């Protein structure tokens, strides 16, 4: 089986440093080892209300971020989810395979729905089944995930296994591999897989945070980046000289992790270089590094967004190539389940 990576980013609001370090930067690196499909998951986005005009803008901006960061849209596949019908079709089949008890254990729904769960959309509740369909439609073998997505990938694995078991006789009768759907493996990133807020080291950096100072947006200029890092919450002590010294210091741990990820290093090496320094000194080094890494991406994103026709053509081409992979899988699923297809 081809070693294939699938991953996606939601087009909901401004992309930020957490999206870049936790996902997009990783996408670029994985291109060297795998066949990759990178998706703007617009079907996931509408599990909560989206303004239609803003959604179109955000879809193009996320695609632009992929390309600006170094994803090769010709060698690999960049597309938006809604252009490939297999995602929604397979999601319905998997809705009928997954169990309510499995979804009831999903912690992210509880967090996103909050106390008013009765008012949450059915889509938000069934979101993990669509995520499983995203992965399994391409029979992806590897999925880069952050810590907060590991539970969803485990669910995708459970659904794949149950489908294979439930339809084992039909799969065998059709002469297909008994492991029709593979067990996708998680690819956990290195430092700063979970980038935290610049205002609160206990909270994840988020597009939805009311304070823009809590995050570094990929559209921020050098002055905005510098101001946000200099105002980032810290404690009065200097940087520790060992990893153990970061315990119980979430803001220090976050800034060191960000530096390590941007520098393609690790926290121990960062502390070996900057341990004992005052935060004012370390923050300036972090400003310089962040601006150097992000400014070229920001400039290229702005150039690409100014040419929506080019982005749309890239997405359309990617969708055609993605569909060519997903359609045989979806056709086989229909045969396995017992649907009658057009010949």
Image (cartoon, rainbow, N blue to C red):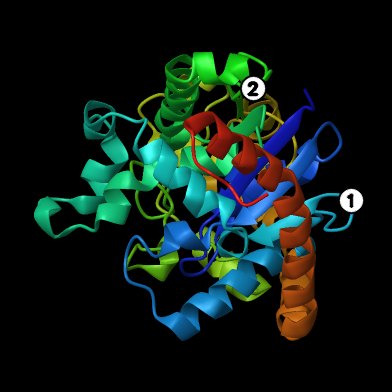
Nearer to the camera, 127 or 270: 127
Q: Can residue 283 be seen in this view?
A: no
Nearer to the camera, 263 or 335: 335
Q: Residue at x 47, y 60 (%)?
A: 43
Nearer to the camera, 297 or 92: 92
Q: Can residue 244 be seen in this view?
A: yes
Please name the residue that numbered disc 1 is placed on.
Answer: 75
Seen in the picture, residue 197 relative to 34 is either above or below; the reply is below
Specify whether 321 is left or right of 257: right
Picture coordinates of residue 166, whole percent (x, y): 42, 18
Q: Which residue is drawn at 35% across and 27% down?
A: 248
Q: Give how far apart the Cα atoms at labels 2 and 1 are.
A: 33 Å
Name the secondary structure under disc 1.
loop
Picture coordinates of residue 206, whole percent (x, y): 41, 56
Seen in the picture, residue 176 relative to 145 is either above or below; the reply is above
Q: For residue 275, which quarter of the picture?
A: top right
| Position of the N terminus by quadrant | top right
Question: Residue 55's mark?
Answer: none
Seen in the picture, residue 192 relative to 279 is either above or below; the reply is above
Do labels 2 and 1 touch, CB within 8 Å? no
Q: For residue 212, which quarter of the picture?
A: bottom left
Which marked residue is nearer to the observer: mark 2 or mark 1? 2
Question: Residue 174's mark?
Answer: 2
Q: Residue at x 45, y 36 (%)?
A: 149
**2 or 1: tag closer to the N-terminus:** 1
Seen in the picture, residue 89 relative to 275 is either above or below; the reply is below
């Amino acid at each position: 089986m081809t070693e294939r990576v699938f991953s996606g980013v939601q087009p909901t609001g401004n992309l930020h440093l957490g999206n870049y370090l936790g996902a997009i930067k990783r996408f670029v690196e994985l291109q060297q080892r795998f066949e990759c499909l990178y998706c703007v998951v617009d079907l996931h986005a509408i599990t909560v209300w989206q303004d239609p005009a803003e959604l179109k803008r955000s879809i193009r901006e996320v695609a632009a971020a992929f390309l600006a960061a170094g994803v090769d849209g010709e060698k690999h596949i960049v597309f938006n989810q809604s252009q490939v019908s297999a995602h929604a079709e397979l999601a319905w089949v998997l809705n009928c395979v997954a169990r309510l008890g499995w979804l009831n254990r999903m912690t992210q729904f509880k967090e996103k729905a909050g106390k008013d769960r009765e008012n949450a959309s059915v889509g938000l509740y069934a979101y993990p089944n669509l995520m499983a369909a995203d992965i399994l439609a391409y029979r992806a073998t590897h999925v880069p995930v952050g810590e907060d997505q590991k539970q969803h990938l485990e669910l995708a694995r459970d659904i794949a296994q149950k489908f294979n078991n439930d339809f084992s006789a039909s799969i065998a009768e059709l002469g297909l591999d008994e492991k029709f759907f593979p067990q996708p493996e998680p690819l956990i990133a290195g430092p700063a897989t979970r980038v935290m807020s610049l205002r609160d080291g206990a909270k994840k950096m988020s597009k939805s945070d009311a304070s823009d100072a809590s995050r570094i947006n990929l559209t921020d200029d050098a002055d905005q980046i510098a101001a946000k890092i200099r105002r980032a919450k810290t404690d009065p002590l200097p940087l520790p000289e060992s990893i153990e010294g970061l315990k119980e210091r979430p803001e220090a741990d976050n800034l060191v992790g960000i530096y390590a990820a941007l520098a393609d290093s690790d926290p121990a090496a960062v502390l070996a270089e900057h341990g004992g320094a005052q935060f004012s000194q370390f923050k300036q080094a972090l400003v310089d590094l962040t601006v150097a890494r992000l400014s070229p991406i920001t400039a290229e994103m702005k150039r690409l967004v100014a040419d929506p026709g080019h982005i749309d053509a890239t997405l359309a081409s990617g969708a055609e190539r993605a569909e060519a992979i997903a359609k045989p899988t979806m056709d086989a699923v229909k045969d396995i389940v017992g649907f009658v297809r057009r010949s």
